[in-house]
C-alpha cells in the first residue's frame, strides 16, 4: 500500500493574502494555477492547540485499528466518549479525519484517516 501524506504548515495572514493575490493575477492572465493542498495554521501556538498529543493518538489509532464506530474508538483509547467525539469533530473540521455514516442505522459513524504521514513545514 502506498503511504499518502498530508502537509501541515504555518502561514500567516500576510503570506496567505500574498499567495491569493498571486494566484488571482495568474488566473486573470489566463494562466493555470497549481492547486496547493494542505492544512495551514497562522502560528505554531494555534497548531499546538489543534494537534494535541491526544488528537494525534486518535489519528494513529484510527489509521492502525480501523474502529467501526466512535464508541469503539473511545473504548480502544480508554477515553470518555464525549471527549473523543469533540476531538473527532475538530479533526474533521480541519480536514484530518473523514467521517462516514454507517449504512446499518445512520446513527453510527465510522472515522477514517486516509494518509500515513503528516509532513510539517515551518518557515524561518
Image (cartoon, rainbow, N blue to C red):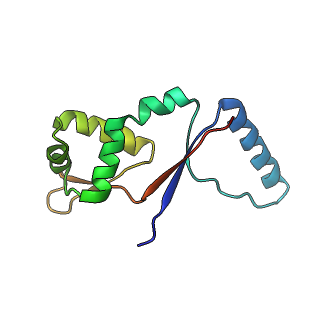
Question: Quick check: 8 left or right of 83?
Answer: right
- Locate residue 116: give its quadrant: bottom left
Q: x and y percent of residue 36 in the render?
A: 64, 53
Q: Is residue 59 above or below residue 47?
A: below
Total labels drawn: 0
- Quadrant containing the C terminus is top right
Please provide percent x and percent y for residue 91.
38, 42
Image-based side of 55 in relation to 120, left or right: left
Toward the viewer: 59 or 32?
Answer: 59
- Residue furthest to the right in view is 29
Q: Residue furthest front?
A: 124
**Res 104 quadrant in image:** bottom left
Who's the residue at 21% across and 59% down the image? 102
Q: Residue at x 73, y 57 (%)?
A: 33
Front residue of 69/7: it is 7
The N terminus - image quarter:
bottom left
Counting from the top left corner in percent of width and height, residue 17 is at: 71, 36
Residue at 36 percent of width and 43 percent of height: 56
Q: Quadrant of residue 79?
A: top left
Which residue is rendered at x = 73% and y = 43% of the image? 19
Q: Residue furthest top?
A: 45
Amino acid at each position: 500500500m502506498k503511504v499518502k501524506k498530508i502537509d501541515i504548515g504555518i502561514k500567516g495572514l500576510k503570506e496567505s493574502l500574498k499567495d491569493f493575490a498571486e494566484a488571482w493575477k495568474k488566473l486573470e492572465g489566463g494562466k493555470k494555477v497549481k492547486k496547493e493542498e494542505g492544512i495551514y495554521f497562522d502560528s505554531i501556538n494555534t497548531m499546538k492547540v489543534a494537534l494535541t498529543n491526544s488528537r494525534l493518538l486518535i489519528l494513529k489509532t484510527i489509521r492502525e485499528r480501523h474502529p467501526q464506530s466512535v464508541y469503539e474508538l473511545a473504548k480502544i483509547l480508554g477515553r470518555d466518549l464525549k471527549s473523543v467525539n469533540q476531538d473527532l469533530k475538530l479533526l474533521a473540521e480541519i480536514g484530518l479525519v473523514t467521517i462516514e455514516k454507517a449504512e446499518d442505522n445512520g446513527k453510527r459513524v465510522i472515522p477514517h484517516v486516509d494518509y500515513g504521514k503528516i509532513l510539517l513545514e515551518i518557515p524561518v
